[in-house]
Amino acid sequence: MIETLSLPPDQAGISNAAQMLRAGQLVAFPTETVYGLGADARSDIAVANIYKAKGRPSFNPLIVHVASLEAATKFVDFPPEFMRLAKIFWPGALTLVAPVKQNSGISDLVTAGLPSLAVRVPTHPLAIRLLEVFSGPIAAPSANPSGQISPTTTAHVLDGLSGKIAAVLDGGACEVGLESTIIGIAGENSDIVLLRPGGLSKSVIEDAIGNKIDASPAEKIVAPGQLTSHYAPISNLRMNVDNPSANEAYLAFGNGLELSNCLDLSPSRDLDEAASNLFAHLRKLDVLACQKRLQGIAVAKVPSVGLGLAINDRLNRASAPRS
Ligand code: TXA
Ligand code: MG
C-alpha cells in the first residue's frame, strides 16, 4: 500500500502530477468523459503497473492521450477520413484506432501486441495542461478496478484505487460522464466502424462525415474490453422497468418523482444530463441497495437515440451475467 495523494487543480498540482508521471508513477486525472489512470505510455514498467493496479487483463489495450492532432500523428498513421474526424471533433470524446507507427516509442503493453493504437485528445483543461507540462503521451484507461463502474469524481477514483496509485489530480465532476466513442477501420474498403459507443454520439459523427457508420463490424473487430461483463455494480440490475417493486432501488429517467430509494437520471428526460449522472447514480443506488438489503436495482427504459445508445450499452453490460 502507498499513500495516494489528492493533488489540487492548480499549477503546483499539475506540475507535481507531471513529475510523478516522469518518475514512472501512476496518476489519475480528470478528462471530460471519465477520470483516467495515467502513466507514461513509453515506459513498460509504468504501463505494467496500470494493469496491476486495475487488475486488468493484459490483452485489453489502453488509450493513449496526447495534447494535439500533431502529437497524435507522431505515433499513428491516420487515413484521410481520420484526419477529418480529428479536425472536427478533437479535442473531445472521440478515440481513433489506427495503425501504430514503427518505432513509435509507445510501450508494446499499451497496444497489447496489436498493430493498432487508440489515441485521443481530451478537452478537459486540466488534462490538456497535464499533457503539455508532462510533454509526452499518457496511457490512461478509466481509473477504476477492472470490470467496475467508471469514475466521474475524485472520490470515485479513491474508492477503487486508493493505496494503489501515487495520486489523483482533483478536477471535480466530469462533464460528459461516459467514456469516449471509439472509431476504427475495418475491411478491404477501410470502412469506418464504431468500436464502442460513447460520449460523442454516432449520429453527430455521421452528420459530420455525411455517411452512416457500421455499428457491428462484419469482421467482428471489437474493442477487446467490450467483450465481457463490465461497469458491474454489486447489485443485480433489472432493465426496462416502469414500476419498480417496493424492495428495489430505482434508476429513473424522468419518472422518479414520488418514489423512495430512487434517483432520476434526468427529470426533464435530457440524454446529455442522463449520461453525466449515470455512473454516479449507479454507484449511489448500489450502496443504498446493499445497505438496505434491497433485491437489486430496477432501471427505467432509456431511448436509444443520441447518447442513449451509449447509456444503454453501459447499462446492458452492467446487467450482463458476471464472468
Ligand atoms: O473516455 C475514455 O475513453 C476514457 C478516458 C480516460 O479517456 N478511457 C477509457 O479507457 O475508457 P478504457 O481502458 O476504460 O477503455 C479503452 C477501450 C477498451 O475497451 C480497449 O479494449 C479499447 O479501448 N482499445 C484500446 N486500444 C485498442 C485497439 N488498438 N484496438 C481496439 N480497441 C482498443
Ligand atoms: Mg474502462
Image (spheres, rainbow, N blue to C red):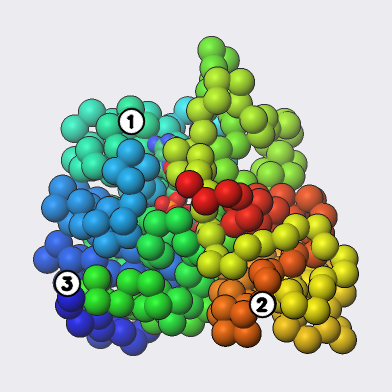
Q: Is mark 1 within 8 Å of ligand 1?
A: yes
Q: Is residue 76 shown above or below 245?
A: above
Q: Which mark is residue 294?
A: 2
Residue 96: which numbered mark, if any?
none
Q: Amino acid at mark 1?
A: Leu
Give the image location of residue 208, x and y in percent: 69, 42
Label pair 2/3, CB-CB below 8 angstroms: no
Residue 41 image point, x, y percent: 24, 51
Q: Is mark 2 within 8 Å of ligand 2?
A: no
Q: Which sits in the foreground, 260 or 116?
A: 260
Between 158 and 64, the residue placed more toward the observer is: 158
The residue sitting at 61% across, 71% down in the picture is: 282
* Residue 186 image position (x, y, % from top left): 53, 23
- Please name whichever residue, 74 or 116, is drawn nearer the observer in this view of the structure: 116
Instruction: Residue at 60% x, 26% y: name it.
Output: 217
Is there CB contact under 8 Å for labels 1 and 2?
A: no
Provide the secondary structure element on which disc 2 rests: loop
Label 2 to label 3: alpha-carbon separation: 45 Å
**Helix, strand, or loop for circle 3?**
helix
> In the image, what residue type sits under mark 2?
Leu
Q: Position of residue 261 (x, y in %)?
A: 73, 83
Which is nearer the N-term, disc 1 or disc 2?
A: 1
Counting residues from the N terminus, which is met first, the one under dot 1 or under dot 3? 3
Residue at 75%, 77% in the rendered image: 247
Q: Which residue is mark 3?
A: 19
In the visual, does 260 lie left or right of 316?
A: right
What residue sits right under mark 1 in the picture?
114
- Number of other residues with Cα within 10 Å of mark 2, as a class: few under 14, some 14 to 19, many 20 or more: some
At label 1, counting other C-alpha atoms closer than 10 Å, the crowd grade (few under 14, some 14-19, many 20 or more) is some
